[in-house]
Amino acid sequence: AYAEYVADVMKHFEDTGKGFKYFSPVNEPQYNWDDATQEGSPWQNYEIKRIVRELNKSFQARQFKTKILVAEAGDWTYLYGTNPNKYGGRASNQIYEFFNTQTSNYIGNLPSLARVIGAHSYWTTGTNAQMADIRTQVASKAREYGLNVFQTEWSMLSGGEGIPNDLGASSYMDNALFLAKVVYSDMKHANVTSWSYWTALGVEQYNHKNRFLLISLTPAGGQYAPITFSGTATATKNLWTLGNYSYFVRPGYIRIGMSGADDMAGLMGTAYIAPDSSRIVAVYVNMANEDKRIKTQFEHLPMNPLSNKRYFTNSFYDLRKYGSASSDTYQEGKVFAIPSRSVMTFVYDLPKETASIASIAHGNFTITSNPVKRGGSLLADFSGYNGKEVAVRLNSLNGFLVFRGDMPILNSQFDLPIPEGILPGIYLLTVSTSVKNYVNKIIVQ
């Protein structure tokens, strides 16, 4: 009955042209939710399996494109481990339980189920080492089952390194920097492909400042007056800091590898490329009390960027453009300062020629089966090297090695099998001969 009710509601939005991409049927099933103060779903894995199967039937019957998203776990650890001391181990080890074909709770073959695992970033930020280790385990387990990872809810319920132990003593910018560090860690270590904040707006109370909101509402009668009163809405440092990511890193962008900025107590950074290869965005978070200097170098880029526009947020400025128009022109080897206790976004506009990099034949090396399907074969023409071997390496844009080995050139071609379990996306194929390296962008579907 519940599945049919949901499907009826979803059908209404489909008919009005506002269909949803995902539907999440449960929220934080690990907890008891017995105090009736907010929504939650205290369900076991087998109960989640049952409702997902029923939803799949209802969605398929109506031919919905909407996908079912699981599992909105209360924190990352429930995705890969079981702790009997945490609510009796209920709803644990969820990647294995739902996506391993040998379990009684397997639902990975349902056509309306998204190949996604979702969790919340709460309670896993105590130390920088803990943040990295837990999220790395999530990424590893998700990769094993060919899943995307969504971070579906976070606000500052707890702190960690870089924030005062007494959260009441933290400043608005302290909280915003911690938010930026959580986004960095979720992107870099958990390899998330979606990140969500809770909540958009609210009233600041109990000295929480901006820990639980992006936009602060103040009723006319004061912070503790009824919300129905008139009042003001104010953008907080959280909104501007999150904007250093979300305003520039748009849907469809893909995270690419960045090295040299991975100190979670100092300077950390992640980088992203536009789906048409027209732009690279790099977001740096500087937790240190002093400026940090960087000198950007690009690898596997056929030509230098045209510009390096910068935007930063700190205790004084909100997503402010940095420098003059003349300083926006890209100069190879130029040194930049990342201000202390700030978030800075670099926008590198690329020449139009890079937008067609996927179809460029580098020298006598041409990809003839691009895009290529998972489980298929990548066919490459390589005239002039018949009967010889070339070194081949296939990497994801975030640096994950998919294949490395020597391939023989037969009839001026080599044939590279694409693993069935890898995620769809853009990959870099590097082919090395004794005299030259060739790089092509590969689209895996």
Image (cartoon, rainbow, N blue to C red):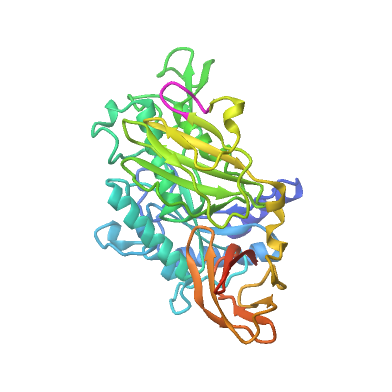
Q: Please tell me which residue lies in front, 246 or 397.
A: 397
Residue 409 relative to residue 162: left or right: right
Q: Residue at x 44, y 45 (%)?
A: 269
Residue 122 image position (x, y, % from top left): 36, 46
Q: Is residue 64 above or below residue 159?
A: below
**Quadrant including the C terminus:** bottom right
Above or below, comparing residue 338 to residue 184 in the picture = above
The question of residue 208 being in magenta is answered with no
Which residue is found at the position 31% from the left and 30% from the top? 289
Is residue 41 in view from this perspective? no
What's the magenta region?
Answer: 313-320
The residue depicted at 40 percent of the width and 19 percent of the height is: 224
Task: Give the overall secondary structure of the magenta segment.
Answer: loop
Q: Percent position (x, y) of residue 56?
A: 61, 65
Where is 362 relative to 257, above or below? below
| Residue at the top extreme of this rendering | 221
Does the image show residue 372? yes
| Quarter holding residue 279 | top right
If the image is split into quadrants, where does the N terminus sit? bottom right
Q: Position of residue 392 (x, y in %)?
A: 55, 74
Q: In the figure, 173 relative to 431: above or below?
A: above
Q: Position of residue 168 (x, y in %)?
A: 28, 27
